Image (cartoon, rainbow, N blue to C red):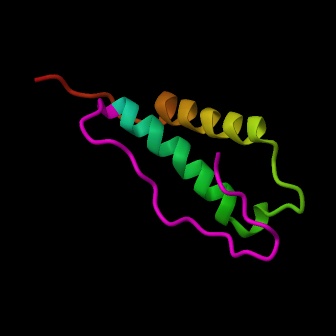
Amino acid sequence: SEHCPTSDEALGVTAILCLSGLPADLTASILAHEAMHAWLKLHPNFRYREQLPLRVEEGLCQLVAFLFLNDGLDPVEED
């Protein structure tokens, strides 16, 4: 389980980690998903008194990963 900062703690993101050696589309999906987690934590206009339910946050992150895979990648040229 992730640590959820209290209102007195500073919000921050230390790192986004991803395994090496994965296929490019999987890596892109993971990084888009994790970047959305970071955005939700860091964006000044997205701070709410109540934390988002985990299912909602994960759903948003999965949606961003899907949208990135659907529209954000250029086709891979095969040799």
Above or below for 46 versus 28: below
Q: How far across and how far down the image is residue 12, in percent?
A: 61, 69
Above or below for 12 versus 72: below
> 9 and 78: which one is in front?
9
Above or below for 5 versus 1: below
Magenta span dominant secondary structure: loop
Q: Residue furthest right?
A: 49
Q: Residue at x 59, y 57 (%)?
A: 38
Q: Residue furthest top?
A: 78
Above or below for 67 versus 44: above
Q: Is residue 16 magenta?
A: yes
Q: Is residue 36 magenta?
A: no
In the picture, which quadrant includes the C terminus?
Answer: top left
In the rendered view, does 8 fall on the left or right side of 19? right
Q: Residue at x 31, y 33 (%)?
A: 24
Q: Residue furthest front?
A: 1
In the rendered view, does 57 fall on the left or right side of 53? left
Q: Residue furthest left?
A: 79
Image quadrant of residue 42?
bottom right
Q: Residue at x 65, y 45 (%)?
A: 1
Image quadrant of residue 43?
bottom right
Q: How far across and how far down the image is residue 69, in percent?
A: 47, 31
Q: Which residues are magenta?
A: 1-24
Q: How far across and how far down the image is residue 47, in percent?
A: 80, 63
Q: How far across and how far down the image is residue 51, in percent?
A: 82, 54
> 68 and 59: which one is in front?
59
> 25 and 5: which one is in front?
5
Image quadrant of residue 26?
top left
